[in-house]
Amino acid sequence: MTTNSMVSEQTLPGTWRNKAPMLLAVGFICVLLSLGLCYFVGGDANRAIGFSVFFRSYLANFMFCLTICLGALFFVMIQHVARAGWSATVRRLAELLANMIPWWLVLFVPILAMVWFTDSPALYPWNAGSGNVSPLVEEKLRYLNPFWFTIRVLAYFTVWVVCAKWFLAQSRRQDETGDATITLRMQKWAGPGIIFSALAVNFGAFDIMMSTDPEWFSTIYGVYVFAAGMLGFFATMIVLVSLLKRSDRLQREVNTEHVHDLAKFQFGFIVFWAYIAFSQLLLYWYGNIPEETAWYHDRWGNGWQYVGLLLIVGHFALPFLATMSRASRRNQVWLAGWSGFILLMHWVDMMFLLLPTEDIHFSALLLIGHLVGWLGMVLLFSGLFMYRTGETPLVALNDPWTPAALSYEVGP
């Protein structure tokens, strides 16, 4: 018996796909509106601050979405390396999320254009060039310059795009042919894919995010971004599964046990994110070296300290307590609500990483502009996901692990 007879060929609801053009249009308008709102943050006296706020806000919202896609890519490859059977019916959703990465390369073009065609330090201070930066940054310009920055970013995206498209293409080919050896091929290449993707995430975090403050450095920064992305991905998966079930999809294919396992992963990364964040803070607090503590100094004043406290409570303490018990992780309504809250905190986390500087103070106008930009990016993400997914089945039809996933059950 083929798994085609066990799994119905379910696709995204037609009502979802029909909304894609509207979501894309409204999302684009919101991003433009965010530009206008952020431009006035600095006031009439300093429009350069408003320009900086917009680009930093754009990058933070960009990374909010990209890290979720990268988390999906890692999930797909890790499941193949582990030869996990339980995830066969949820893995396709992760493949589809990872397949969004090429669109995010397109959305990075405005940042590359700013780097290439201006010498503005609005986002990357090193972009001002030799003679216009501090002596410490001057020493880094052989690495931090438009040409090599672009080459490295394209290399990172090449690794991510190739891995994401290859694994989805192989999975779709198995849908059509039922060839079980395709699974063995994906298991074989998942290991190298994880290695190269992990390196790309680590160095990509250094280049794309950490170099917004080029005088500061942290060897744990890439791990922090990875942990945040994985947590954002599991929260997205739980919310997406919940919405699909409410639309009469995946009723049999994804049961309480699958959601419970996603919740356990989510809980683990709540703790892991907090561990990495605290480890980084502790080392710099203990070392007390000025060029290392300056990054925290910018984030412990001008209103940003309250955002930091919010992350401690909202990104760790509350979701930790709310999803710690087995009963809470098996209550899908409760779990979906907290997963949505975790996604909101993931957005706050990206804002905390990228927006604070000595000149950018937290304000109501900044928050509104950034929030509108986030809404625009999320709508673009949703519209592109629906457009790119199209008629693709939401569950792998002929995966040899699917029978095990359909009967997956964990004891009490």
Image: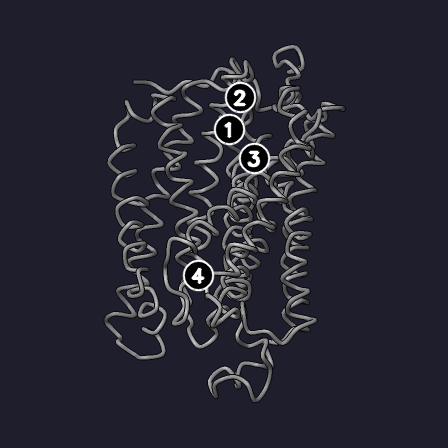
Dot 4 crowding, Cα within 10 Å, few <14, some 14–19, many 20+:
many
**Comes first in the chain, label 4 or label 3:** 3
SS under mark 3: helix
Dot 1 crowding, Cα within 10 Å, few <14, some 14–19, many 20+:
some
Q: CA distance from mark 4 to mark 3?
A: 29 Å
Q: Nearer the viewer, mark 1 or mark 4?
A: 4
Amino acid tagged 1: Leu
Amino acid tagged 4: Leu
Residue at image position (55%, 77%) is: 126
Q: Nearer the viewer, mark 3 or mark 2?
A: 2
Q: Nearer the viewer, mark 1 or mark 3?
A: 1
Q: Is residue 155 visible?
A: yes
Residue at image position (63%, 20%) is: 15
Residue at image position (67%, 67%) is: 150
With 267 as the anchor, is 395 left or right in this view? Answer: right
Residue 36 vs residue 234, the one in the foreground: 36
Residue 355 circle label: 4
Q: CA distance from mark 1 to mark 2?
A: 6 Å
Is disc 4 in contact with disc 3, using a CB cutoff of under 8 Å? no
**Comes first in the chain, label 3 or label 2:** 3
**Residue named by callout 1:** 240
**Residue named by callout 3:** 94
Amino acid tagged 2: Leu
Dot 3 crowding, Cα within 10 Å, few <14, some 14–19, many 20+:
many
Q: CA distance from mark 1 to mark 4?
A: 28 Å
SS under mark 4: loop
**Comes first in the chain, label 1 or label 4:** 1
Image: 137 above or below 218: below
Residue 244 circle label: 2
Q: Nearer the viewer, mark 4 or mark 2?
A: 4
Amino acid tagged 3: Ala
